Image (spheres, grey):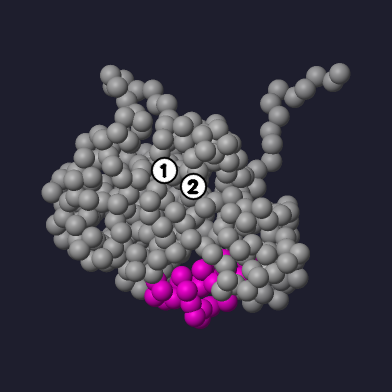
Amino acid sequence: MAKPQFRQLRHAYGFDDVAIVTGDVTINPDQTNIEFSLGELSFSVPVIASAMDAVTDVDSAIMMSKLGGLAVLHLEGVQTRYDNPAEILDEIAQTPLDKVTPLLQKVYSQPIKENLIGERIQAIKQGGGICAASVTPANTKRFAPLVAEANADVLFIQSTVTSARHISKSYQGLSFTELLKSVPIPIVVGNCVSYSACLELMRTGIHGVLVGVGPGAACTTRAVLGVGVPQITATMDCALARDDYQRESARYVPIITDGGFRKGGDICKAIAAGADAVMLGSILAQAEGAPGQGYHWGMAHPHPALPRGTRIKVGTTGTLKQILFGPSSVTDGSQNLVGALRTAMGVCGAATIKEMHQTEMVIAPSIVSEGKWWQMLQAPR
């Protein structure tokens, strides 16, 4: 037998590498059910606005709830460091690119005001919104009780990479199992990209897992750290963990693919790959009234020693309702995202999200260019 290679690599696939195969039966798009459940909560739209300062503030969180989705407020961002975060957001948007990283390092070095955590959560609740709030693992023990006390509906615990087992110098690290006993609301944890890490996270008893490391438009983790897995493969691996865990425990824990989305087709592919919902950043940062004012930046950008991510200009393309439901005024797939998902499910004969998980996919990198010579020729440069 020939000696094997030292390390054998498997191929991993992103959105542009695959295509969805149509079904043998088709369904009217308006007869599809795209509901998404998280704990006891149910959402008519499987779209979550990311916990990034350019995407989610109090007003956008309320609006997202009214449209049937969910928005996550970043509790370690400008909303909880400043009494008037709008002034800071204005400054970030107006600062030249070559000076924005030092500015962000300065902005995010200010201490978090714990009283603002409750005030922001209450503002969302009083506005009629479902409130989801995000903290990092390092600050979870400190902030989780405040989140629960303010009657938030969901707690997200997020970092670039999160695992169920973390080694540190502290006497006792963060235990999700113990946290669940003290925080009486659904807990979503992320991010991860592997079968084993996802399975271990689910076994702690949490209510949802975020999938994706480094694919976001404003994220440079893959360039700076060299870590990550393309989103289709990451989603499929974590979906397998979810299904195996359901067989093991009889408990279904949804996975949420987070990052790297540019258009409706990407969302359709993520759902077909096994996602129960998607988390969007840059697409929603393009909405009128988004706190980033046409800009978007990674939350690791202000790191004091190793800034990652970058501020990007995404522009403003339409209202949040238009981006989600249309009518679309563009042809690039960045508006009417819900309509795109329903239509894709219809041509695949999938009446529900879970049925869409069974849709066939093929490796097809030419899907983005086949027959599109005139479109590429006329694309803006």
Describe residue 325's horizontal placement relative to residue 101 as left or right.
right
- Would residue 353 appear left or right of 319 to someone viewing this image? right
**Residue where numbered disc 2 is placed:** 254
The part of the chain drawn in magenta is: 318-344
Relative to 96, 111 lies left or right? left
Q: Is residue 88 above or below residue 163?
A: below
Q: Relative to 131, does residue 195 appear above or below in the rendering? A: above
- Rendered-image quadrant of the N terminus: top right
From this view, report whether residue 57 is shown above or below residue 326: above
Residue 294 seen: no
Instruction: Identify the residue shown where x is 69% and y is 26%.
Output: 7
The amino acid marked with disc number 1 is His
Q: Kindly check if marks 1 and 2 are in contact, taking CB atoms under 8 A apart as contact.
A: yes
Residue under label 1: 207
**Image quarter (top left, top right, bottom left or bottom right) of the C terminus:** bottom right
* Kind of residue at badge 2: Pro
Secondary structure beneath label 1 = loop
* 329 drawn magenta: yes
User: Could you tell me which secondary element the residue under label 2 belongs to?
Assistant: loop
Is 381 contained in the magenta span?
A: no
